[in-house]
Amino acid sequence: MFLKEVYVNRRDQLKKDLNSGVMLFMGNSDVGMNYPSNVYRFRQDSSFLYFFGIDQPNLAAVIDPESGEDILFGDDVTIDDIIWMGPQPSMRDKADRVGVKGVLPYNKLSEYISDVIKKGRKVHYLPPYRDNTRIKLNQMLGIAFENLKQEASVDLIKAVVKQREIKDKYEIEEMDKAANIGYTMHYTAMKMAKLGMVEQELVGVMEGISISEGTMPSFPIILSQNGETLHNHMHHQILTENRLLVIDAGAETNMHYASDFTRTLPSGGKFTQQQREIYTIVSTANQLAIDMIKPGITYREVHLSAAKVLAQGLINLGLLKGDLDEVVANGAHALFMPHGLGHQMGMDVHDMEDFGEDFVGYDNVTKRATQFGLKSLRMGKELKEGHVLTVEPGCYFIPALIEKWKNEGINSQYINFDKLKDYYTFGGIRLEDDVLVTATGCRLLGSKRLPITVDDVEREMSQN
Ligand code: GLY
Ligand code: MN
């Protein structure tokens, strides 16, 4: 937990930004895996953590900007809870640690909210993403399940994004820690990878590191020699000669801040000539993007510049053809990179994606595109000092997508479909780093950068 003042100041800022109605923050509860008391690892709601800091289930809180009052709703433990879970601090103690004056039992929440509604005041809530929360909101507010997301408070979403997207010095320290754990996870996998191993062995070790140094991976580890499937969670294959292993993984610290790195390794430690050529294009795009990031530029401009590096590289190899600007303007390169350059990151690996991506990655000036590829860019808007972003260009050869474009004649004037036959078993490459936007540019998070050049990766792996 941060210092009490951090939470008090954050709530005070909310009270200034939203001065009417009552803000309701729902904490998360435990979720049963196969029966109610055998639960998934508990994960508190990130906005609840941000404003109230308490990392425990079955809590809710309100902020009343008109009276200035903050109230935490939750129950003190019973003797049965103490027998199974040990002694716990009282609700009063927990509230004091984060500077909250009001404490009420959880079953008073419905009554409190019903009083607010009776007085004709608005209840501002964030879009729910868990069924328990949906049920509770439905019961308290009388809003149908299917309308809960669209009736969430846009004013509250905007006020929360405004604060959470600019990381303060305490958060940056945590994000550096998350990056360092992510580094150890990836570096260990890079040193362990050997032909004959099963992919799952690497996943287990990486996940173990994330748990021993933090809470857990920041999302289920993506690790596969079929890296052309962007989010591949199947880890059953044996590492075999001349394949590419995409590893996309990060850690969550004990304070729940995330990292998210991707490296692509040659399965046997040495890239083939074909792999080297594509890898170098992607690593050049990654570096160009990092070099461009600074306050004032939009991330869409950075994405499109990285796309141009990719397209030019593929034109040089004869896989794309025509005028570079036209190729990119028509989205022909998106056959090879159907995703965006990156996203914001904080307590969520895709920060605040539960609110809706457009509230986080776009604004009144930069609107989301509709074109294939570009529409998948999660962060498009102007960058500010304090933003944390991922930079993750990639190049993939997805046979089903190539066949579809070929059969439907999509961008066919820019694509050399015959030559692409040689790449149907290539797989994919993605290279991802995490950066903090500074006053004049950006810096990589973490104390060391994972090896990224062809030579550095081969050198590391030659000693495996
Ligand atoms: N690292 C997974 C993603 O960004 O979607
Ligand atoms: Mn990512």
Image (spheres, rainbow, N blue to C red):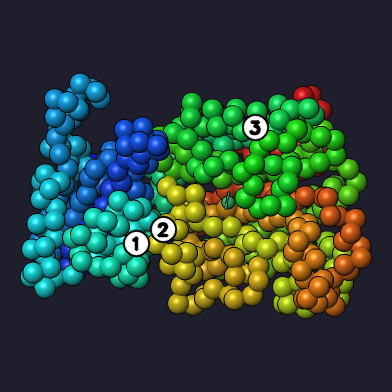
Give yes or no for contact between labels 1 and 2 (Cβ–Cβ under 8 Å): yes
Q: Nearer the viewer, residue 225 or 328?
A: 225
Look at label 3 and name its amino acid.
Gln
Label 3, on which residue?
Answer: 200
Residue kind at label 1, given as amino acid type: Pro
Q: Quadrant of residue 208?
A: top right
Q: Give the residue drawn at x 63%, y 69%.
A: 374
Q: Is 54 on the left-hand or right-hand side of 343? A: left
193 vs 98: above or below? above
Q: Amino acid at mark 2?
A: Asp
Residue 138 can be seen in this image: yes
> What residue sits right under mark 1 in the picture?
127
Q: Residue 90: horizontal and vertical position, in percent?
A: 14, 33
Work out whether mark 1 precedes mark 3 in sequence or the reverse, and give the earlier one.
1
Give the mark, 3 or 2, whose residue is nearer the N terminus. Answer: 3
User: Whole-percent x and y of residue 347?
Assistant: 42, 47
Residue located beneath label 2 in the image: 354
Residue 145: which disc? none
Q: Residues within 10 Å of mark 2 (few under 14, many from 20)?
A: some
Asked if labels 3 and 1 touch by Cβ distance under 8 angstroms, the answer is no
Disc 1 element: loop
Q: CA distance from mark 1 to mark 3?
A: 35 Å
Q: Nearer the viewer, residue 58 or 214?
A: 58
Q: Is residue 36 above or below residue 384?
A: above
The structure residue drawn at horizontal position 79% and vertical position 64%, both measured from the top left corner, is 402
Residue labelled 3 has its Cβ within 8 Å of some atom of ligand 1: no
Circle 2 — which element? helix
Please report the residue visible at 74 percent of the width from the left and 27 percent of the height from the top. Answer: 197
Q: Is label 3 or label 2 in front?
A: 3
Q: Residues within 10 Å of mark 1 (few under 14, many from 20)?
A: some
Q: CA distance from mark 1 to mark 2?
A: 7 Å
